Image (cartoon, grey):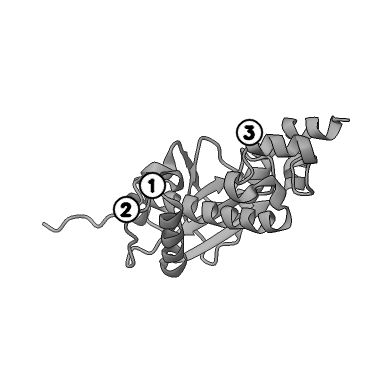
Amino acid sequence: MPSKKSSPAERCGVAWEQPGLVVGVDEVGRGPLVGPVVVAAVMLDDQRPIRGLRDSKALSPRRREALHDEIMAHALCVSIAEASAGEIDALNVLQATMLAMQRAVRGLRLPPSRVLVDGNRLPPLAVPAQAIVKGDARVACIAAASIVAKVRRDRWCLTLHERFPQYGFDAHKGYPTPAHLQALRALGPCPEHRRSFAPVRLALQAP
């Protein structure tokens, strides 16, 4: 007796009652003091599998770049969206992340039938969705989204470093490392710093 053909969602690691086009969603950049939150939505192609997909944090920068290029070349579709530092300050970082997730899903070339989101919260979406804790380590399409988002934001940080090399954005990528905090205290914030985050707010108040 022939085996039952698995659905795209099952091949992503999560079983659904109905087959369809499944998209994985992940974000990068909630913790840094500077710049946007970046969200990627990725719909993989079962006919063009990509080996080695995993949580972007578990990959070397060189391997992330290679997998990013492979995902961009072979995925059925990829959508990348952002919420700016200004939107983060206005909404708070969680709500800005939800907004960026909505933008990423809306930007897909193909409409998904299911959305799988890394974490434990879901943005309001017009299609069925599931939040999956540690999804970037468990689900291939979410892992792909984490890689795309991480590479996009890291490249943005390199561009910001060219504008403001004194902060060291190429090294710490905007996270509150001792070197970043020292530069922030000495120089004050640059235009892309998130004014609502405590270290930046304190730097603004310093005499």
Q: How many marks?
A: 3
| Other residues around mark 2 within 10 Å, as few (<14) / some (14–19) / many (≥20) | some
Residue 84 appears in the rendering: no
Quarter-of-image position of residue 137: top left
Relative side of 95 to 17, left or right: right
Q: Of 142 and 67, which appears nearest the observer?
A: 67
Quarter-of-image position of residue 94: top right
Residue 162: percent from the left, percent from the top?
68, 58
Residue type for callout 2: Arg
List the residue tagged with mark 1: 139
Residue type for callout 1: Val
List the residue tagged with mark 2: 11
In what quadrant of the picture does the C terminus appear? top right
Q: CA distance from mark 2 to mark 1?
A: 9 Å
Residue type for callout 3: Pro
Residue at 48 percent of width and 50 percent of height: 146
Residue 2: percent from the left, percent from the top?
14, 58
List the residue tagged with mark 3: 178
